[in-house]
Amino acid sequence: MSYSPKIGVWLCECGGNIGDVVDTQKVMDEIKNQVQFVKRERYLCSKPSIDTIKEIIKNEKLERIVLACCTPKMHRETFLKNVIEEGINPAFLEIVNVREQCSWVHKKDPEGATLKSLDLIKGAISRIKESKELHTKQMHVTQEVLVIGGGVAGITTSLRLSEYGLKVHLIEKSPSIGGHMIQYPKVFPTLDCSQCILTPKMASIAQSSNINLKTYSEVKEVTGSPGNFNVKIWVKPRGVDVEKCIGCGECSRVCPVEAPSEYDERIGKRKAAYIPFPQSVPSVYTIDFDNCVRCGLCAANCPREAIDLNDEGKIEELNVGAIVLATGFELFDLTNLVNYGYGRYPNVITSLEMERILDVNGPTGSQLIVPKTGRQVKSVVYVLCAGSRDTEVGQPYCSRVCCLYSMKQAQLLRDRGVDVWINYIDIRSPGRRYEEFYRLTQEKGVNFVKGKVTEIEPNGEQVLVRSEEMMLNKMMENVVDLVVLSPPIISSEDTAKLSEMLKVPIDEDKFVLEKHPKLDPVATKRDGVFAAGAVIGPKDIQSTTAEAEGAAMKVVNFLGMARIIEANKAYLARNELCDGCGKCKKICPESAITIVEDKPVFNEITCSGCGACIPECPQNALDQEGLTDIQIQTQIKGILNDTKAPLKIIAFVEKEVVYTAIDLAGLARLSYASSIRIIPMPSLARIKLEHILYAFSYGADGVMMLEAPIHEGPYGNAHKISEERAEEYKWALEDYEIDSSRLWYSRVYVPDWRKLERIFNTFHEMVESEDPIEGNQRGKILKNLLKIKD
Amino acid sequence: MSSENSGQILKINAENKEFKEKIQDLSGEKIDLCFQCGACSSGCPMVQEMDYLPSKIIRMSQLGLKEVLSSKTIWVCTTCFNCEVRCPRGIDIANVMEAIRQVVLRQKFDKVNIDMLTPEELRELPQIAIVSNLRKLTA
Ligand SMILES: Cc1cc2nc3c(=O)[nH]c(=O)nc-3n(C[C@H](O)[C@H](O)[C@H](O)COP(=O)(O)OP(=O)(O)OC[C@H]3O[C@@H](n4cnc5c(N)ncnc54)[C@H](O)[C@@H]3O)c2cc1C
Ligand code: SF4
Ligand code: SF4
Ligand code: SF4
């Protein structure tokens, strides 16, 4: 390298924490010839020390800074902020961890600790010489959002995003938004009026100037990439001009055709020219072309000439930066469970049908009757888990809300003097105020019977319900007027289709898979695509709303963050070498690579910087910003060159989870061999065979690869890749006559920090027991490597 | 549950409802609140001598099963109130026991003449049973 930058090195004594073990004077003496400036501080993180650093950077015109002190997890951000203020590029600051990794763990071996500190600093110096400036970039990210599904989840997310000032396109497949919630008269656990709390929100959607509401519409196609999706919307033929219709209902009044009302769960009827329910949003009529006889009466009577019976629908195109899936749930088809007689017996209905019957404006006109027979209902049995928690004929999971909504309905029925029985397997009422709700239900005199109902048979105009009464070890036969079944809550066909379109995986139960079920529950596995509500799994309104709020925040975060990109991305460094084989695309765990005209194109928003693609390239065409192959190589070289340490081990460690565990081992003052020299990596999938060979050729006696568990940490998706590679590398080492046992691979969890002492010492002892690697053997590897290179 | 009763089919009708309400009224306890946790039974010192566990007496009362009237349990209960102290739903089980005894006593039939009991029998009989014998014409 012809140009050599001015480097300044600071050593911290950390009171005595470092200085009492590491001979800082000796370290200073050793490196002072390699750099422009060296200084020692008692407490480097103190304000006066930081001020001196800034002062000296200015006076000495330093260009690159190496700080040997505590773990970068401690003060890196503070140091970075201050050196940036002095015009230092973030790429030109290196922190060497001589506390957690040296003085604290090698207390009994001060000489080893000193040698190791020196080596690590040397490594940082040679690496920083090879560093290139990093710049944040501006990416084009469309500041518009697509929300699919207008239930309580989609409504909440849309409102929140529009309040934030983002343009939202809310797509709902039915003629009105509202989802399932608008069908319920009351909601648990507060028994407040569902429509009263949801209708104002629906009205705000209609009024918000930031929301482009498209009802009776579906998503047909999604292309593009996170931050920049192109979406085709199919606006279904509605026969009514949404802009012109004033919701007067003339069309409906004159329409001669009746069809079952979807809103009333097909118990009631509506016209072919209809509005699903009075508070529909938008307040616009729809012509149901499946049932319309094209008599033309509606068109003739519409005062606004809004009706077009030849409407063929249209495709509209959108460009959005992020997408929120909120397509909710459906109910399992209970005609599949023949023993319940649903569909055959008029007095066996679903819970959703019961919601409509309980509505004062419902299809039975607030009368408690069996819809099909008109018979008065004085006694009801609720069948919980009618298909849920059944691995054989239904769904294996718990539908989570049936216990509670059945208790809700039971209370409403008790208030009207009806005898109610709830047959259950387990009553599940976890959640704020839910146990209290259960108690209240008992207090109202609802009868609970432990024992799942499986047999129902007609009994005159009533039905006979058989179950066990498990508490008394008896059988029970109950003759009642009506049976209400709780079908499993399932994911819809639509959701499955959308998941394919959006490249978002679904789980074994066909619900949208969360990015992390606990720590990232409203993000999907695809960047820029989020989800909220029942589309992720059965849940109540409270959790749905919480998720919807969370998804809105995630979107805001995503659209904002994507504008500034951290520069740690993979890129095509040697265009001429790439032959477009596409192996990088195949391995990338984030699907960040597309092959365009035989070259990889990296989506810089999606690339996590795990580095997995780089070793995969057979042509050696790729590299990574801020962590180039040459940086890694020179760091290894810097550490190992001219070292006086008797035994040298290079340990590549994952930089979040494993690095933290190593810090914790330091904090606990564990004691391991000072031969271990740590180099952090985003994921061990970044390591090439070449890096390991360089380590051996420069003098390492052993190499460790300590990977984090799969899916843990920011590069978690790449962690499974390194395991197979390590196996290959072991075999490859044998080709160079290096025993494969000299390459160690294992996974370390944060709580494993106690084990690190043993892991490090075991490997150290093992390497120590082997015959040393001969100098000419190392020379051969290096020659070979250099030949590979040129 | 005694074995001769198991396998029997429960059929609930208006009479059951009436009986349950009677016990509820007499005891003043909200027996509907019982969720069959079994705490009352596990705290009861007399279960060895009982045919139905206290929790089952409550369950049977919820269902309005008249079998409780002929149970040994109600006479063996010593009214120690341990069940009441344990019940997480705030039910005073001993009150329910008393209510059921009351229903029996109010039938005012007389099978035992207290003067005819031998000293051995007096020693063996549960206290409640003896006291109830004295109460049977006044309850
Ligand atoms: C009988 C019953 C009673 C309940 N009672 C209560 C209660 O009292 N309290 C409570 O907290 N919870 C209750 N729940 C649960 C509650 O219904 C859910 O928590 C809530 O509806 C979830 O809202 P969501 O927006 O995720 O889904 P949904 O309400 O299902 O809304 C999804 C929306 O997306 C639309 N959509 C679907 N596919 C597409 C597509 N491809 N394109 C465009 N739009 C699409 C749908 O038309 C719908 O409008 C009950 C559930 C049931 C079954
Ligand atoms: S919520 Fe209750 S009824 Fe519904 S599936 Fe779960 S346990 Fe069964
Ligand atoms: S493999 Fe890792 S570094 Fe390479 S493009 Fe994918 S996410 Fe980025
Ligand atoms: S302790 Fe109370 S709730 Fe539990 S079984 Fe006995 S009476 Fe029922």
Image: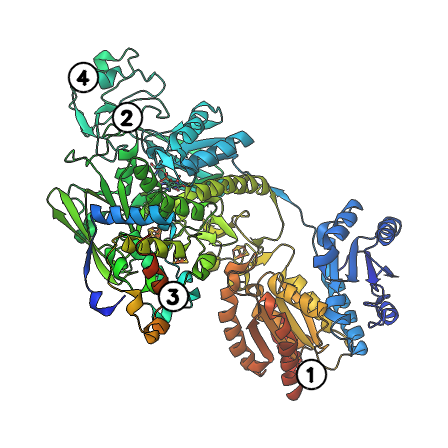
Tell me how the rendering is colored: rainbow
Q: Earlier in the sequence, mark 1 or mark 4?
A: 4
**Tag 4 and tag 3, C-beta contact below 8 Å:** no
Q: Secondary structure at mark 2?
A: loop
Amino acid at circle 4:
Gly
Q: Residue furthest front?
A: B115
* Of the pair A284 and A773, the residue shown nearer to us: A284
Q: Residues within 10 Å of mark 4 (few under 14, many from 20)?
A: some
Q: Answer whether residue A8 is visible to the viewer in this image.
A: yes
Q: Do the residues under discs 3 and 2 have CB atoms within 8 angstroms?
A: no
- Residue A461 position within the rendered picture, expressed as x and y whole percent measured from the top left: 12, 41
> Is residue A593 depicted above or below A416 in this figure?
below
For numbered disc 4, what is the local secondary structure?
loop
Task: State which quadrant residue A281 falls in.
Answer: top left
Mark seen at residue B127: 3
For disc 1, the marked residue is A775
Distance CA(mark 1)–CA(mark 2): 82 Å
Q: Chain of mark 4?
A: A
Kind of residue indicated by mark 1: Gly
Circle 2 crowding by C-alpha within 10 Å: few under 14, some 14–19, many from 20: many
Give the residue at mark 2.
A238
Disc nearest the viewer among 1 and 2: 2
The residues bearing labels 3 and 1 have C-alpha atoms spaced at a distance of 98 Å
Asked if A118 appears above or below A468 in the picture, the reply is: below
Earlier-in-chain disc, 1 versus 2:
2
Please state which of residues A217 and A248 is positioned toward the viewer in this rendering.
A248
Q: Name the chain letter of the residue that bears numbered label 1.
A: A
- Pick the quarter of the image with the N terminus of chain A: bottom right
Q: Residue sitting at 37 percent across and 73 percent down?
A: B123
Quadrant for the C terminus of chain A in the image: bottom right
- Report x, y in % for residue A639: 73, 70
